[in-house]
Image: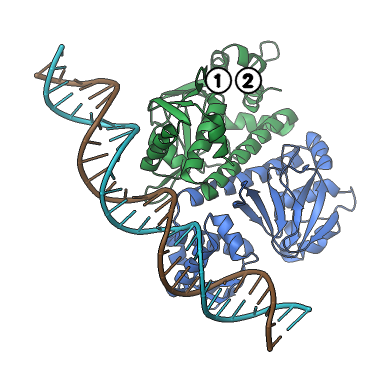
Chain colours: A green, B blue, C brown, D cyan
Amino acid sequence: MPSPAAAIAQKAYAHPMTAPRWGDEAESRSPIDVVARLGIVASYARNAEIFGEDQAADHLYIVLSGAVRICKLLGDGRRQIETFCLAGDVFGWEMEPRHRFSAEAVSECKVVRIKRTILFSRAADDAELAHALWALTASELGRAQSHLLVLGRKTAQERVATFLLDMAARAGSGQGTSGIEVTLPMSRQDIADFLGLTIETVSRTLTHLEEISAIALPSSRRVVLRDGAALRRLNS
Amino acid sequence: MPSPAAAIAQKAYAHPMTAPRWGDEAESRSPIDVVARLGIVASYARNAEIFGEDQAADHLYIVLSGAVRICKLLGDGRRQIETFCLAGDVFGWEMEPRHRFSAEAVSECKVVRIKRTILFSRAADDAELAHALWALTASELGRAQSHLLVLGRKTAQERVATFLLDMAARAGSGQGTSGIEVTLPMSRQDIADFLGLTIETVSRTLTHLEEISAIALPSSRRVVLRDGAALRRLNS
DNA sequence: CGATCGTTTGATATTGATCAACTCAAGTGG
DNA sequence: CCACTTGAGTTGATCAATATCAAACGATCG
């Protein structure tokens, strides 16, 4: 079964004879090239705003490369990052006419924009597309609910461990001899705002995990998960 | 526009000629009686489990009376309540075949059960129903995302204030002379597990809000919102 | 009337936040 | 090529918010 993102991209742009396929092939070839042909591709510089809170929600976005953060702000500047979107992830899709959060480029990134109206009208008589859009919302909900448990009830160590395992599973980086290596696209501040901690606590916790040799930190943005079992133990 | 719950109840059981209507009428008459005729009504005692984590998800539920808590547990017993469902709310609706959380009766409560298979097959060729189901998921997502901000970045006072305002908006209780009165169906422990706090902190915070006369506590389960503005200020 | 459960209140401990200094790597311009 | 700057990250000392432990209180029920 193709991913929701693949199904949506296909539906939105498919021509009877020349419909590009994405999904099955995406794993083996380069999904980026395939999707880049489909729609309007936009690039954003590090920290650029893709859309802001309360702005009109008239596009859906699919990340081609780089990473995007979805966030909410409190009046005094406190920030909560709801999720990070990596290549293949969809964001900006909402029922209401206005965005309830903002989206910013974590790193230099490329995204495809698909008009909301196109999807909306097609979904009305295309059950498969409607299902894909719903599946998308449902998986977002699942992710949010798991994160509620993290923010509400887990300790700093557990939060960081959960985050690292999650990133490893998603970015699915190289299996080195001494563990899975993950390259984090986001800053410590981003991680802190995602996990409901401060930048100092994130830093200290990473250092501590290194001390107990659960992880290694070849550089600040690269993490090697040495002892997955230990991390998973911190995950309950 | 009828509520998602109303649309679903109608779709699932509508007969061409005798389709009961719920939604528009629900506000003025008693929605409970109307829905009670529609499907299988089940009653649960205080603290009874309606379904458990990882159990097969083959029904969707609509609360008729009382309240239900949706929760997740950590291995060592720590609990996070994702949301409380009050009369008219829908729960148990998921994409995956198994529930990712459990549902328990907060108080003596009545719910209608609708078979998942019925909804699923009808949604395939009924765009309106599909839309209602999707809208439901989307509004759950919105609620979860707001709660992420609460759990990740708000102080105990702000959490409690947000909770009280939210309950007042949902339960929409009586406008007394000295403020809006809300009757909380859940215990302090439930509130604590919802807000990511301890029972003692919830209690102390309520006492403090009473001291600054933002609220009054005629009894432990009844709260009068005296100074809505003060509470909203704590909401950022 | 005593038992029980939920809640409140008090004293103390702990986690993570805050404030501050320092390190390190990556530019940048002379 | 090398000071100088800048931004990100780390580390340390201290503080504050909330958790924990413990006791008292107050309704409800048999």
* Residue B227 visible: no
Which amino acid type corresponds to the residue marked 2 in the rendered image?
Tyr
Q: Are marks 1 and 2 in contact (CB under 8 Å)?
A: yes
* Residue B218 point in image, percent of width and height: 56, 78
* Residue A54 point in image, percent of width and height: 48, 44
Identify which residue, C21 or A137, lies in the foreground.
C21
Q: What residue do we see at 50% from left, 17% from top?
A: A176
Q: Which residue is mark 1?
A: A39
Sort mark 1 into few (<14), some (14-19) or many (20+) by Cα contacts within 10 Å. some
Identify which residue, A160 or A52, lies in the foreground.
A160
Task: Residue A230: name its quadrant.
Answer: top right
Identify which residue, B181 or C3, lies in the foreground.
C3
Q: Chain of mark 1?
A: A
Residue A5 placement, left or right of D22: right
Looking at the picture, does residue D2 appear above or below residue A8? above
Picture quarter with the N terminus of chain A: top right
Mark 1 or mark 2, earlier in chain: 2
Sort mark 2 into few (<14), some (14-19) or many (20+) by Cα contacts within 10 Å. some
Q: Which residue is mark 2?
A: A13
Picture quarter with the C terminus of chain A: top right
Secondary structure under tag 1 reads loop
Identify which residue, D24 or A107, lies in the foreground.
D24
Which amino acid type corresponds to the residue marked 1 in the rendered image?
Gly
